[in-house]
Amino acid sequence: MKPIKLKKLISKQDLKSLLTSACDSIGCSYFIRDTSGVILYGKESIETTDHFPIFFQETQIGEVCGSPKAILIRDIIHHQINQEIEKREIVDDSLEKYKEISLLYKLGEYLSRQLDVHSIAQLIIEESMENLPGRSLAVYLNEEGSENLNLVSKYSKDKIEFPETLNYKEGIVGSIFQSGVAEIINDVNEDNRFVHKLVNVRSMICVPLSINYKVFGVALIANKEVNIYKSMDLKLFTAIASHCAFAMENAILYRKKLEEDRIRANLRRYVSSQLVDAIIDSKGEITLEPNMQNITILFSDIRSFTQKCERLPADKIVNYLNTYFSKMVDVIFNHEGTINKFVGDMIVALFGAPRPTLNNEKNAVEAAINMQKLMKSFPDDWIRDNFHTGIGISCGDVVVGNIGSKQHMDYTAIGDRVNIASRLQSLAAGGQILVTDRIYELTKGQFSYKKFDTVVKLKGKEEAIEIYEVIQE
């Protein structure tokens, strides 16, 4: 607070009147002078025996000289000084509140239009630099599931260094992230939580970024000097950070929503909407990274497709195929299947990927039966009369996931069991469904089968695989 000038205080008419009446009441002669010896009230010729210092806070600004009763005059002046301090505090508090309200209004106007996390973090830094004592600031955010606080934005002077990552279980910053309580640390070297990753920092304010008591980051302002910050600074920095935290949370949610929408749009090309929702809701438990999974593979192909379509114009063929694929995909999706790919007129579907499901084998056989039933009652006459599909199904451990290059990737399956399903499909006549002995063993209590008169033997493999045909009612 700016010091009070004793001369200006005594020159006020109400205090002058009070001093005059007090002098008459107590019968005391005195004079008042400042610390330079300049007489501000009364005459120095008065005989004095005592000197009573006048203080503003802890600093002497003058003295009352006179008889012992002159101490009452000093007390009157101290009372006036205290009143002046109270007035100033009220004015300062009002100005600070006005400043804070104006700042938050300004922030609100900007933040209502902002959905970029980095821009909001930069705003915390800019507004704090303008309104608080500090030459270095940083904003860190935590990604859910990670132990790291990642640097989002910074402004650094005085050779203060902010690392790119901090562990939220370590140091002052980590402690505040975990407690969710803002703090002033006016000498970090006196704090046993301090770790020397924040280079050249001596004092700091650190505040959590949180919504509904859930902390997702921290903002800090630092200085190379000690004892820089006051409670008023903490209050304002907390107000700035808290106001921005709401906008930052909205920006994070918006970014997640965009990412989810992108993932949904991509996944809906392969799997049903219900499975897409399950993948999104799994929060990382379901992965598209290549991994070994036990799944069931279905191949379906139209017999003699090329010959039947050779006299048709290309656009007509495409229309027929799109109509056919749309109906077949619906059946596969209804049985929790995933479309792996279309190859010409062939459909490759997976059951049990990307989300593991119970009864993969049963779902695949049921899907195949319903696909063949649909072909017999297909709404388009030409497709019903000319598209006759052979289906092959196998199961087992294969590598499933996104496979390809940086420029192009496909979600697919690789392994012997994929090749076997392809071989069975090539052996199946139109309207026929062929399965491996493993599928037969797992589903023979649910479907009717008859043994097929051919076995499959893969190139380079000694083991022959017995084949069964599904009996369709």
Image (cartoon, rainbow, N blue to C red):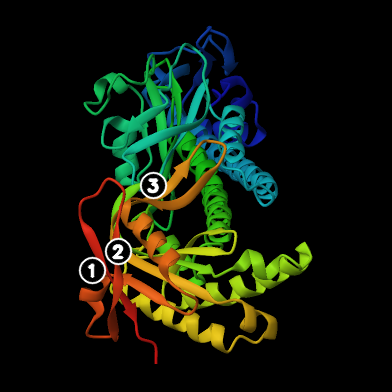
Which residue shows up at 30% across the image and 44% down it?
Answer: 178
Q: Residue 92 occupies which quadrant of the picture?
A: top right
Asked whether residue 25 is in view, the answer is: no
Q: Position of residue 400 (x, y in %)?
A: 37, 52
Q: Is residue 310 above or below residue 149?
A: below
Total marks placed: 3
Q: Which residue type does callout 3 highlight?
A: Glu
Residue underneath mark 3: 289
Rounded to the nearest whole Å, what is the CA distance between mark 1 and mark 3? 27 Å
Q: Position of residue 364 (x, y in %)?
A: 37, 73
Q: Earlier in the sequence, mark 2 or mark 3?
A: 3
Q: Is residue 385 above or below residue 239?
A: below
Q: Earlier in the sequence, mark 1 or mark 2?
A: 2
Q: Is residue 139 above or below residue 254?
A: above
Q: Position of residue 268 (x, y in %)?
A: 55, 64
Q: Residue 183 occupies which quadrant of the picture?
A: top left
**Which is nearer the eye, 69 or 184?**
184
Q: Which residue type does callout 2 highlight?
A: Cys
Dots 1, 2 in contact, CB < 8 A: yes
Rounded to the nearest whole Å, what is the CA distance between mark 2 and mark 3? 20 Å
Instruction: Locate residue 115 relative to residue 290 in the image: left or right.
Output: right
- Badge 3 crowding class, 10 Å Cα cut-off, few under 14, some 14 to 19, many 20 or more, is few
**Which is nearer the eye, 1 or 396?**
396
Rounded to the nearest whole Å, what is the CA distance between mark 1 and mark 2? 7 Å
Q: Position of residue 40 (x, y in %)?
A: 59, 17
Residue underneath mark 2: 395
Residue underneath mark 1: 438
Which residue shows up at 52% across the image and 67% down it?
Answer: 301
Instruction: Locate residue 189 relative to residue 253 in the image: left or right.
Output: left
Q: Which residue type does callout 1 highlight?
A: Arg
